[in-house]
Amino acid sequence: MGFILVALVTGYFLIPVSEDRINRSKFDRIQLGMSEDQVADLLGYDEMLGSFDHVHMSWIPNRRTISGNMNWSDEDGNRISVDFKESRVTGKEFFRSDRPFVERMRHRIELRIGGLWP
């Protein structure tokens, strides 16, 4: 009984907090010419970080074009960077985290403990 409890608690702290959405497989699905929305549907809207060199609002309602770079990252430090020109993918890069296993686990535990108390 004690072993099961220890296993459950350990799993709670070591399992990633967020779904593994920043990986090579998702990166490979990003194609040149995809729209910003298609990429965000694949990688998520919540974690979009980026800067745009140019945002153009069209005279057509709800239409805009973007040019710049967007980044998506996960709790382990993996990152996908996507370049856009006129709201279409023109380039992409995948950066695998170089954090050691122990550091990744420590960071996950800190996130879990922080999530227990507001």
Image (spheres, helix red, strand yellow):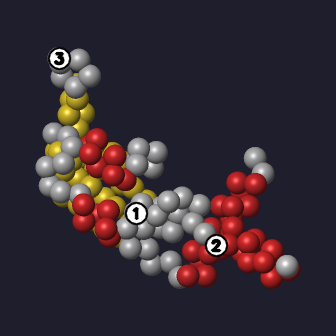
Please give left or right for residue 108 compared with residue 54 in the image: right
Residue position marked by numbered label 2 in the rendering: 14
Cα distance between the residues tagged 2 and 1: 17 Å
Q: Secondary structure at mark 1?
A: loop
The residue lying furthest to the right in this view is 2
What is the x, y in percent for residue 114?
72, 57
The residue lying furthest to the front in this view is 1
At horizontal 17% and vertical 17% (from top left) the residue drawn is 59
**Numbered marks: total:** 3
Q: Label 3 is placed on what type of residue? A: Trp
Q: Label 1 is placed on what type of residue? A: Ile
Compared with residue 101, is residue 63 higher up or lower down, i.e. above or below?
above
Compared with residue 24, is residue 42 higher up or lower down, i.e. above or below?
above
Compared with residue 78, is residue 33 higher up or lower down, i.e. above or below?
above
At horizontal 16% and vertical 39% (from top left) the residue drawn is 86
Residue position marked by numbered label 3 in the rendering: 59
What is the x, y in percent for residue 75?
53, 63
Label 3 Cα neighbours within 10 Å, binned few <14 / some 14-19 / many ≥20: few
At horizontal 45% and vertical 78% (from top left) the residue drawn is 98
Q: Secondary structure at mark 3?
A: loop
Q: Label 2 is placed on what type of residue? A: Leu
Please give left or right for residue 101 compared with residue 62 in the image: right
State whether residue 53 appears in this view: no
Residue position marked by numbered label 1 in the rendering: 22
Q: Which callout, 2 or 3, points at the residue further toward the start of the chain?
A: 2
Q: Which mark is residue 57?
A: none
Q: Which callout, 1 or 3, points at the residue further toward the start of the chain?
A: 1
| Residue closer to the observer: 54 or 104 | 104
Tell me the mark number nearer the camera, choosing from 2 and 3: 2
What is the x, y in percent for residue 40?
33, 46
| Residue closer to the observer: 5 or 82 | 5
Label 1 Cα neighbours within 10 Å, binned few <14 / some 14-19 / many ≥20: many
